[in-house]
Image (spheres, grey):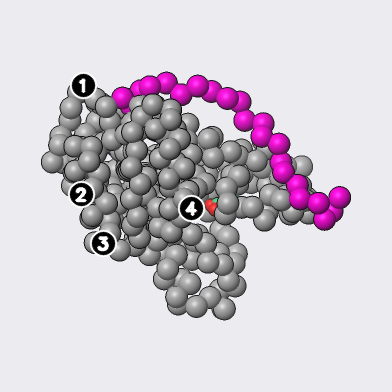
Amino acid sequence: MDNEQYTPPNEMPVMPIQPVLTGQVAVVTGASKGLGQAIAIALGQAGARVLVNYHSDEKGALETVETISAEGSEAIPFRADVAREEDVESMFAEAKGRFGRIDICVPNSGIQLNAPVDEMTLQQWQRVIDVNLTGQFLCARAAIRQFKRQGIDRSLSAAAGKIVFMSSVHDIIPWEGHVNYAAAKGGIMLLMKSIAQELADKRIRVNAVSPGAIRTPMNVEKLTTPELFKSKLLKLIPYGRIGEPEDVGQAVVWLVSDASDYVTGTTIYIDGGMTLYPGFIGAG
Ligand code: BGC
């Protein structure tokens, strides 16, 4: 049994997504797999047209596009390295050119290059900061410029634009061996709040989601190795199940819809209670 691959069961309740974003346009980065793919599909199910960004996994991006099209909305794939200013600028120009406007930005792309701190190379540090922090800044900046040019169209939304940054439980939980990743996510928290403060009067809403352990390609090893999953990871999740990418997709749909119109500058933790210090249960 120990050597067999383990697949945690999917215990997520299925909730139908309502078409609350009809007519709106979303840019989702890192949408060829994992969270970005689920978010892009959820936004498509909610009626948005979606630019599906990818860096290297073109096949995955095309799957995302096909799923969105099959479910009745429109999507286009676009290759860009979010850490490169010129790539990000062309990506937003393409979204505006193809769809005529941009209402929603989900800068989701993220990587992990792990190492003990004293062995971490400058390259490992820099690339993670470039993709996970600078990449989100560049996308948010491009989106905001477009939101300001457009202003509010009340037939589509009460806000002039919505950004949902991709953070992590590691914006508050320290993570040994991943100092580059945790530093980037900690940075996202105050990047998000500062932009939210700066743009609230323009009715641009800016929030973040902070997922815990979700079933994504990034976490395959932890999920399929019983010693890692059952005896270690699951102990960190009081709710007792692994998160599904769709758990995050649904939260993002709510955060960019008018149902959350009074919500800005907030982080939603989607983590089954991982940030509730479960180590204190029966031990504090
Ligand atoms: C990371 C996952 C990790 C989770 C909880 C996320 O930000 O991407 O790899 O399992 O945090 O530690």
Neighbours of disc 2 within 10 Å: few (<14), some (14-19), many (20+): some
* Mark toward the viewer: 4 or 1: 1
Circle 4 residue = 171
Residue 238 vs 232, above or below: the answer is above
Give how far apart the Cα atoms at labels 3 and 2 are: 12 Å
Residue 259 vs 277, above or below: the answer is above
* Mark toward the viewer: 1 or 2: 2
Circle 3 residue = 85
**Residue 155: image tag:** 1
The amino acid type found where label 2 is placed reads Ala
The amino acid type found where label 4 is placed reads Asp
Residue at 33% across / 50% down in the picture?
78
Per the image, label 4 sits on a secondary structure element best described as helix
N-term mark: 2 or 4: 2
What segment is highlighted magenta in the picture?
1-22
Give how far apart the Cα atoms at labels 4 and 3 are: 24 Å
N-term mark: 1 or 2: 2
